[in-house]
Image (cartoon, coloured by chain):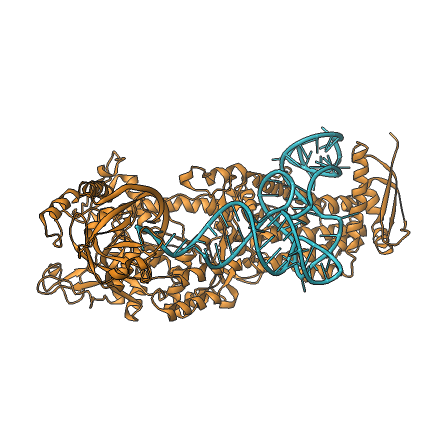
Amino acid sequence: MTEPGTPSPRAERTVPDKPALEGLEARWVERWETNGTYRFAGDRTRAEVYSIDTPPPTASGSLHVGHIFSYTHTDTIARYQRMRGKDVFYPMGWDDNGLPTERRVENYYGVTCDPTVPHDPDFSPPADVATKRQDFVPISRRNFIDLCEELTASDEKVFEDLFRLVGLSVDWTLQYTTVSQRTQRTSQRAFLRNLARGEAYSQEAPSLWDTTYQTAVAQAELEDRVRPAAYHDIAFHRTDGAGDLTISTTRPELLVSCVGLVAHPDDERYQGLFGTTATTPVFGVEVPIRAHPLAQPDKGTGMAMICTFGDTTDVIWWRELDLDTRPVIGKDGRFAFDPPPWLTTDRARHAYGRIAGKGAGGAQQVMVELLREGGELLGEPEKITHPVKFYERGEKPLEIITTRQWYIRNGGRSADLREALVDRGRELDWHPEFMRHRYENWVEGLNGDWLVSRQRFFGVPVPLWYRLDAEGRPDHDDPIVPDEADLPVDPQSHVPPDFTDDQRGQPGGFVGDPDVLDTWATSSLTPLLACGWEEDPDLFALTYPMDLRPQAHDIIRTWLFSTVVRSHFETSTPPWRNTALSGWILDPDRKKMSKSKGNVVVPTELLHQHGSDAVRYWAASGRPGTDTAFDPGQMKVGRRLAIKILNASRFAINLGPAPEGAAPTEALDRSVLVALADLVQEATRAFDAYDYARALQRTETFFWSFCDDYLELVKTRAYGEDPDDTGAASARATLELALSALLRLFAPFLPYASEEVWSWWQDGSIHRAPWPDADALRAEAGDADPAVLAVCADVLGAVRRAKSDAKVSMRAEVTSVAVDDTDRRLAALAGAAQDVRDAGRIAELTWSASTNGTENEIRVALADG
RNA sequence: GGGGGCGUAGCUCAGUUGGCGAGAGCGUCCGGCUUACACCCGGAAGGUCGUCGGUUCGAUCCCGGCCGCCCCCACCA
């Protein structure tokens, strides 16, 4: 693509009689697509490319106002960079793999995935969609995945149409999905390379487990929720017979899993007990009493029971004190049916029989009864509320269950790596800057590596197999790795090299890894994915590392951080140069808008009601990184602005073209160009700092005074019957320059109105026109005095005030205006006196130097009547 | 407990190198069909810039202490 030249008006102009916003979206969306206005050319150098790592929206939900808000921010940057002459690489991805999609498919069709169900080639979804989960129809993994793909494809089309309506200048030929074959290939390749370099490893260890979804989850996906609970004081019996020990617990049902008691090493109450043992109530199991600094003397009785596993502190105690492992809760969150082997007495085994098969809540009730029956519950439970860890999408508290899982190192267990990743963060420019703290805060607070395997179905499979020994036990330490050329693989259906399908699951044969990779394990690769890593080297060289990652601030700890981790390992660079964090949308009560609160607004309705430019105006008024109130009032303001642009432009353009070779010669005209040059400079600086909101605000302020003052002042002269009249020629030349620049300043924000006006009198798309040039405008202005416009506006203002006070029409005649001011301002006024007389309908305008040289005064005398 | 953001007109917010009579829009009130726009135009009222100190000739702005609101992280027997 050739560098666009300086725009110049066409000779013939086509301006509608009654310009309107209605219908602009439909017309321009289509033309932009037909003309390839936003197409990435890819034929320039890296320095001339601006590449954007667009956040792939979750395809399984619906787009909400927050999407419109933040995607508009990015779009203003994209449009600005394009007008600065950059070849903008602006792809769109759809995040359609992972749990949200599974959940949506389950509910939408009333089905669940059961890998044991055979594939049904003639399957079609149930006609009557069940509403209750237990009534969902179990279907095979392959049928389930087919449904996932079907539904996401139609969801994505709806999203695309909405984003086009918003006016995102995305290159729609650059779409990717996170569950496509290409993405799976990239994701598996990246994982295998992590494995080969030792950055990925598997380990059997206690991990956080969601019993509803029956999958392990990662630290980054946790959230606290405050739940009711109760302290239960229960009696442990000292083995030496010297009495009982009281401990307080909120989870008495875990008593059967108790592997020890712990108190702080300095706790005087328990000094003699460390190293001795106690027996658990009800079950009579002997457990050691130990000391550990994490035990808090001021909590409960200062002595806690350690269970495998009640919470993450238990895991630490268990590991560091080298205690036994006594798990009883299964992956479904229920107590195992058979009594565990460490229960040896009849009483213990009988008691266990009463909690076997129950969930945590049911087991707790029974346990309290058992304790009470044995006189081992001291007093009544004391009700409290406390924070409990949940999977962010989960419905029940997490349990901790020992399972084999895959991890990618992220610095959680290595100070060196942690430091290296903090440093990578420092290589980024953060917008706004203070968001950097969230990143560093998170990285420095990590307490384990990144758990990437998930026990789910719809996702990128872990691309590995394991050899089975003679007893049919898998060898997890030496996985069978596919050749990169064979990716993507599904180890559940594909056979590893040197094996045959009938060896699957047989002793001496192999077994495929049943898990899929965490959705972030794939999302963390969006820069590699979008830029064609290992697939399109030319594109990759042209676009990576990318220029910008826009995203919401709440996923710094997940998406942003994990992307930095993967790029650090894969390319030894940060993934981008800049990251821009957008804020939340708050409803008018200052609460975060969300579906569960029922206060979401449907974006399509907003766009149709106010118009896309109006909604974009509201969005772009939100400062970077700042939470912003949902405000239809601002959309009305934006709509008014867009309409004003249409009308003012129509007026200016209809005055007729400036004669050949005309230039701004009048003092007032050149004065407005000086102010305009300042505006362009400021807007440019703001955009370069990613402060689109400031650029918009300054442009808007300028534009309204341009209309109210400059247009009014220049109107009469510009009408000039004789087009060769120098005053009229100067006015028209100035209006052309100013309007052209102003439209281009507005183009990133109001792409429809600005494009519409542009098409009336210019060739090509405004969105491919060059960004206005402050120096060129300054050159046109020459040595103009910026005070000219200011003084004229002051006088005009005084005249208006006088007319308003007298309650007469603005068209009323003014007998005389006398101005006292400084010499400099009077000189400025003198140069534009006729414009002021015309605009104010002033018969006589006089001026004289103010007596003290600084004060100014404007006296207005209205005609009688 | 650690980190971060924010308190300016009734509402939403600007205020960038400390000096303006502290601004805008919305809302309110008053006026006007003015040959671009009644989806409009003009005007007015309205603020001890959270609070108390400090630095300075001078503080909405810089420093410190409080008060209040919000977010993230940690703790979770």
Q: Nearer the viewer, residue B56 or A438?
A: B56
Rendered location of residue A529, percent (x, y): 38, 60
Q: How many marks?
A: 0
Q: Nearer the viewer, residue B13 or A445?
A: A445
Task: Write the residue at 24% across / 67% down.
Answer: A483
Rendered location of residue A251, percent (x, y): 26, 47
Give me the chain that's orange: A
Left or right of A1: which side holds B52? right
Rendered location of residue A760, percent (x, y): 62, 46
Task: Write the residue at 11% across / 46% down.
Answer: A347
Q: Quadrant of residue A675 in the image?
A: bottom right
Rendered location of residue A421, percent (x, y): 41, 67
Taking the image as drawn, is residue A746 in sight? yes
Q: Is residue A255 above or below residue A561?
A: above
Q: Nearer the viewer, residue A46 or A420?
A: A420
Quadrant for the C terminus of chain A in the image: top right
Give me the chain that's cyan: B
